[in-house]
Image: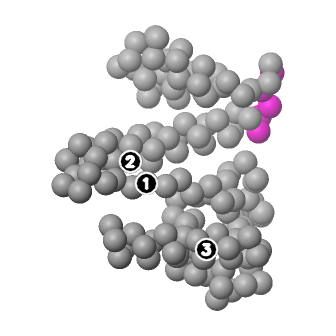
């Protein structure tokens, strides 16, 4: 019910067909009787898509249509969050949060190695290389 109410608000200008398409997309991985955990994760996914993904995708498409170089770049960071919050530790379904990529770009896994795994240090190294190459060549 919460998912349908939220999606109805976000798709109100798309008719019932838009609502049904969105419901089908967001509950496609649910079990027959979804758990509270599944519902919470779905609500987070919807809000994240509405607040970040939709506007980012629109900006990327506008940039791609108007870029003089013809190159437009984007990435999705999905490394699970290492921080703890009020509900310690953060629930595993929360995944990465907005700006969780920044410590990796600036090498935090190397300056605080006890807080990160070897694979996270590798990820940081890759991200530093990607961003450095992007800054150098565009």
| Residue 74's disc number | 1
**Is tag 2's residue or tag 1's residue first in the polypeptide sequence?**
2
Q: Is residue 4 visible?
A: no
The magenta region covers 33-37
Q: Which quadrant would residue 83 be assigned to in this image?
A: bottom right
**Closest to the observer, 125 or 47:** 125
Return the x and y of residue 32 as percentages of the image width and height. Answer: 80, 19
Which dot, 3 or 2, sits closer to the camera?
3
Question: In the image, what residue occupies the spot 57% across and 57% down?
Answer: 77
Structural distance between the alpha carbons of marks 3 and 1:
17 Å
Which residue is tagged 2?
56
Question: What residue sits 80% from the left and 24% below the top?
Answer: 31
Q: Give the vertical position of 2 relative to 37 (above or below).
A: above
**Residue 64 painted magenta:** no
Q: Residues within 10 Å of mark 1 (few under 14, many from 20)?
A: few
31 horizontally vs 40: left or right: right
Quadrant in the picture for the N terminus: top right
Mark 2 vs 1: CB contact within 8 A: yes
Q: Left or right of 56: which side holds 28? A: right
Is there CB contact under 8 Å for labels 3 and 2? Answer: no
Ranked by sequence position, the earlier of labels 3 and 2 is 2
**Numbered tag placed on residue 124 in the rendering:** 3
């Amino acid at each position: 019910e919460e998912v349908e109410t939220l999606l109805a608000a976000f798709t109100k200008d798309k008719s019932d067909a838009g609502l049904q398409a969105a419901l089908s997309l967001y509950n496609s991985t649910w079990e027959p009787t979804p758990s509270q955990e599944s519902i919470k994760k779905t609500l987070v996914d919807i809000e994240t898509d509405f607040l970040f993904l939709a506007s980012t995708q629109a900006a990327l498409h506008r940039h791609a249509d108007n870029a003089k170089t013809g190159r437009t770049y984007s990435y999705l960071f999905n490394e699970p969050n290492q921080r703890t919050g009020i509900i310690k530790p953060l629930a595993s379904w929360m995944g990465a949060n907005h700006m969780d990529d920044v410590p990796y770009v600036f090498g935090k896994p190397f300056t605080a190695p006890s807080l990160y795994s070897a694979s996270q240090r590798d990820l940081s190294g890759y991200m530093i290389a990607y961003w450095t190459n992007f800054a150098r060549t565009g």
